[in-house]
Amino acid sequence: MNFDLTEERQMLQDTLRRYLADKYDTATRNTILDSEAGMSAEIWNGLAELGVIGALFSEDDGGFAGAGFDIAVVFEELGRAGVVEPMLDTAILGGGLVAALGDSAQKEIIEEVIGGVVQLALAHGEPTSRYDLARVQTTAKADGDTIVLNGRKAVVVNAEAADHLVVSARESGAADDAEGISLFLVPAGTAGLTMRGYAMLAGGRAAEVTLDNVSVPASARLGAAGAALPAIETVVAAANVALAAETMGAMQAATELTKEYLMTRKQFGRPIGSFQALAHRMSDLLIELEQARSAVINAAGHLETDAPVRDMQIASARNLMGRVGRLVAEESIQMHGGIAMTQEYELAHIAKRITMADHRFGDTDYHLERFIALSAA
Amino acid sequence: MDLNYTAEELAFRDEVRAFMQEKLPKEMADKVRGKGELTKDDMERWHAILNEQGWLAPNWPEEYGGCAWNAVQKHIFDVECAFANAPRVLPFGLAMLAPVLMAFGSQEQKDHYLPRILNGDDWWCQGYSEPGAGSDLASLKTRAVRDGDHYIVNGQKTWTTLGQHANMIFCLVRTDTDVKQQEGISFLLIDMDTPGVEVRPIILLDGTHEVNEVWFTDVKVPVENLVGEENKGWTYAKYLLTHERTGIAGIGSSQAGLDAIKRMARAEVHNGRPLIENPHFAARMAQVEIDLMAMATTNLRIISKAAVGQAPGLEASMIKVKGTIIRQEINDLARRAAGPYAMPFPSEAVEGDNDPIGPEGAAVVAPQYFNNRKLSIFGGSNEIQRGIIAKVTMGV
């Protein structure tokens, strides 16, 4: 066993950490949050130039890494700095699906993704699907060489900025059948595609997407008809590693800020951290942070294993991150007091990132259920 | 002992319920349910509607225009207000300052300010916390120096809730720096229109402008605005804080909140079934409901014991801690119930006449969850309350 990062990953971590420490302070991020786009083109280009996007793709796909540990390294740093740019959506989800299922023509956009010039979004969740990946009621009907899409997609993160949407739709079967789901690469601006966009509480933007007789050529289908679910599950597994790592990075930021505050803020003539009632709670957070780090390592290290083992590790990690994340976010705010409730203070945003990660691809309870089902199997 | 409402109490409940149906404007209730933000005008209108009915001041004695309700009536009113989605009645004048004036104010102050509080002529805010004086409130530094028939006030207050709407602020100020911290504090009433008073907004993590900084630069305050005796302000402040804590259990709002979660969980689909049937979610909900059932009785027991105008000490701290834990747990559950639809930011999701994004009520749950982290921080943090409980019961 060896728990050290490889030299390449260590370099990636150092470079990214330095870049974000330099470029991404609270005031800068608040400007980004207030902007119409909800993201910074300058930061996105910067990340692309550093090779951060390329680190999320394998060499076969034109990147230079792409394993679970690479994802974990990148997202831990994005989480630590509270980055709101849509790396998860463009690279892991959209890019991951094109890489997994696309033919050589379709895969040409990956080079542009890695270069930072193309944005993607996964339009999969629907108003009543909650966290269930197999529940797809959007329909795809073949009409000669054309496929017509109809349906509604919910909380599609990065939809407005995306140059292409990766849209899931059902070609056969009942609403929650594993079989029958296909994916289509739909260019922005295709007739019949409408969006109602909005900002999100923890940063970034999303949209309710309506597909009203959207026609695409059969060549827009990614992979075989009706067989997309396993690939969706695989990229969502990667997304869950990313979310767990991002939350862990954010938890580090939260505990560092809290520790610092407890040692500098004085009440009753002494640093508040010298009160045992707070010191012990801070110690608990640090204990849980180590647990979180291990959970992320477990999940990242099993991303390339067979689905049943992979999914149990991932359900385990996300359940733990959900529980521990809540504790860290709430206790960090509480031990700070009012100051942590203000938009100007770094922790406010970090706490929102930690908490709202529990609303993507399954919350604490969803992953508990998954774990129970998978460990009983 | 009898846990049932008497016939009179049931009649009172029906009367309150009918009043809410008839007099609470629908658009206000909609806003409380999360379809928009209450304006200053809304809050003033609701205040006036209650005042016209004589129901504005449940805690005041009758001689000052209060309701003279017993504990059970107050509880019933609280619950009915919450279920009707009535706006919160602001506590600053009615529940915080008024008891202090009644107990320690001059006759002139009572005659002048109390009717103005009822009539809504003054909007009060609270000048207690300072950047360096939070939990350690007695370390406050805002200075008031006597100069003839005025005090000259300099310093800064913070976390001043709705100070942007207020025309009056009651302040703790330091009038003697040579004695023990607690012995040099006075309680001063300050007109916010006085030159040298400046209000600066603080934006909270849910994007709302609810609290402010209030800065004082050479502000001239007439000496008749001193409440009680100079340097006795700490006694009055502690008296006020116990009053602030008694209202904080929020039983009615917790019960209404739990009801809203059940509605959401019936409509929300989880793996093809209603979320409310999911054993993990149902267990979380049951745990909170069990705690709340006991809490409602704890609250009633304690407020029954406390005579009108007499502030409970130890019990108030207990209710504050447990009541806020329950309220925050309910906010957490509501967030979970909303699933992915907790992510949209409500200022956009509920903007204008647009349909809300996602299922009914979902857009506000996450901001409310974050906003209500304040419950365990303000009014004496839960750590301070636990310290009080330990001190009273164990002498440590």
Image (cartoon, rainbow, N blue to C red):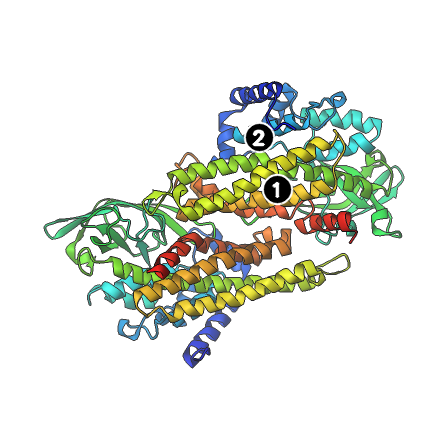
Is disc 1 placed on a helix, strand or loop? helix
The relative height of residue B268 versus residue B133 in the rendered view (above or below) is above
Please say whether residue B195 is visible from this viewpoint.
no
Quadrant containing the C terminus of chain A in the rendered view: bottom left
Q: Position of residue B174 (x, y in %)?
A: 82, 47
| Near-viewer residue (B120 or A41) | B120
- Chain letter belonging to callout 1: B
Q: Where is residue B152 in the image (x, y as percent from the top left)?
A: 82, 43
At x 37%, y 63%, the residue is A312
Left or right of A32 in this view: A142: left
Which label is found at residue B323?
A: 1
At x 43%, y 60%, the residue is A318
| Near-viewer residue (A293 or B214) | A293
Circle 2/circle 1 CB separation < 8 Å: no
Q: Position of residue A28 (x, y in %)?
A: 52, 59
Which label is found at residue A20?
A: none
Quadrant containing the N terminus of chain A in the rendered view: bottom left
Label 2 sits on what residue type? Answer: Val
The relative height of residue B94 versus residue A208 in the rendered view (above or below) is above
Quarter location, residue B268? top left
| Near-viewer residue (B284 or A216) | B284
Left or right of B265 in this view: B396: right
Q: Position of residue A75 (x, y in %)?
A: 43, 66
Left or right of B345 in this view: A272: right
Mark 2 highlights which residue? B79
Label 2: few (<14), some (14–19) or many (≥20) C-alpha neighbours in 10 Å: many
- Chain letter belonging to callout 2: B
Q: Earlier in the sequence, mark 2 or mark 1?
A: 2
Please say whether residue B389 is visible from this viewpoint.
yes
At x 63%, y 56%, the residue is A335
Furthest residue toward front: B1
